[in-house]
Amino acid sequence: MPLPFPPLGPRPFLDEKRRVLEKARYQGFDVRAMSPVIGAEVHGLDLGSLTDESFAEVERALLDFKVLVFRDQAIGAEAQIAFAERFGEVDDHPFLPAAEGQPKVDRFAKDADTVGVENIWHTDVTWKELPPLGTVLRAIEVPEVGGDTLFADMASAYRGLAKDVRERVASMRAVHDFTNSFGRLLDPETRAERQKQFPPVEHPVVRSHPRTGEPILFVNRIFTSHLVGLAPDESDELLAHLCEQATFPEYQCRVRWAPGTVTMWDNRAVQHYAANDYWPRKRVMERVTIVGDRPQGIAA
């Protein structure tokens, strides 16, 4: 049976979200919405000197907007880590280069010779049993134009599915695996060792956000290999349809970087895409990732 054509015209549930976010107010800083449903720029806050009260408000804003952008932050890696650690344990990445002297900081240094390949919609590290809670990304050097990062609200993506598709996938599970991404860069022996260390994992196709309870579409093009219980052709077709939902601009916001910009996103609730339109110019970013929880399904 053919899958439904992408919806045309308005999506009324987006207005519900817009009305909620328009009423959001926080003590100690202002926010400026970046789209009707996802993303906000935070003004009047220094991440290097957060009080406990300010942090509690930042955490609340993150749950509301899912992506927070902090401009003109004069912080280094240590302060970036300290901010991330307020949310939980900081994780390292087994396949990415770390910043010098900072094993918990992933460094993305791209130029004419080291090409960025993050321009595909994805959720970070879903191939772990405990995918990240969130990510703090700091811009160090960026091109004057280009190199933006786009984010998609996967709760809206789930709500935008046709009703019969939502019902079909509500209790399904999917397998996530690093092999077809990072595994391609490894020699066979190293790949086999890492596959033992990080075997494929199953997560619900639709997870419940542990703090807000929102149902979130939790599959992505890079790391989700197949849907459990379906024949390969059927799995490929349905998975492609689900992953396509992240591409709709109605669910997105876009971050334009400048040196000193810090962006945090809720990795449980969004996908992101780093636009590769700046080659051969230089783009240097540093990332800290926060350990999350085991995803729970909405039908559990």
Image: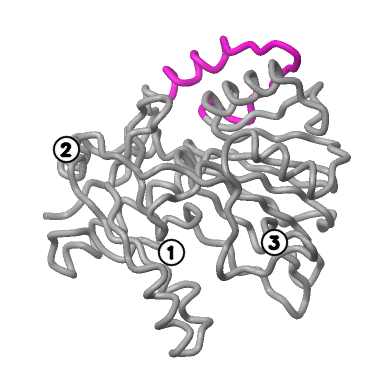
Image quadrant holding the N terminus, namely bottom left
For discs 1 and 3, the disc positioned in front in the rendered view: 3
Question: Magenta stretch: residue 36 in it?
Answer: yes
For discs 2 and 3, the disc positioned in front in the rendered view: 3
Estimate the spatial distance between the alpha carbons at disc 2 and disc 1, rounded to whole Å: 24 Å
Instruction: Give the extent of the magenta segment.
Output: 14-37
| Crowd tier of the residue under label 2, counting other residues whose Cα lies within 10 Å: few below 14, some 14–19, many 20 or above | few
In terms of secondary structure, where does tag 1 sit?
A: loop
| Apparent side of residue 112 relative to residue 199 in the rendered image (left or right) | right
Residue 98 lies in quadrant? bottom right
Identify the residue at image location x=39%, y=31%: 210
Q: In the rendered structure, find residue 167 and report the number of the disc placed on it.
A: 2
Q: Amino acid at mark 2?
A: Glu
Compared with 195, 62 (above or below) is above
Q: Position of residue 8 (x, y in %)?
A: 35, 37
- Per the image, the residue denoted by label 1 is 222
Q: Earlier in the sequence, mark 2 or mark 1?
A: 2
Compared with 256, 274 (above or below) is below
Q: Position of residue 106 (x, y in %)?
A: 67, 60
Coloring applied to the structure: one colour
Q: Nearer the viewer, residue 20 or 262?
A: 262
Q: Amino acid at mark 3?
A: Pro
| Apparent side of residue 205 relative to residue 38 in the rendered image (left or right) | left
| Apparent side of residue 199 relative to residue 276 in the rendered image (left or right) | left
Residue that extends furthest to the bottom in the rendered view of this protein: 188
Question: Magenta stretch: residue 94 in it?
Answer: no
- Per the image, the residue denoted by label 3 is 103
Residue 9 lies in quadrant? top left
Q: Amino acid at mark 1?
A: Ile
Estimate the spatial distance between the alpha carbons at disc 2 and disc 3, rounded to whole Å: 43 Å
In terms of secondary structure, where does tag 2 sit?
A: helix
Identify the residue at image location x=23%, y=38%: 162
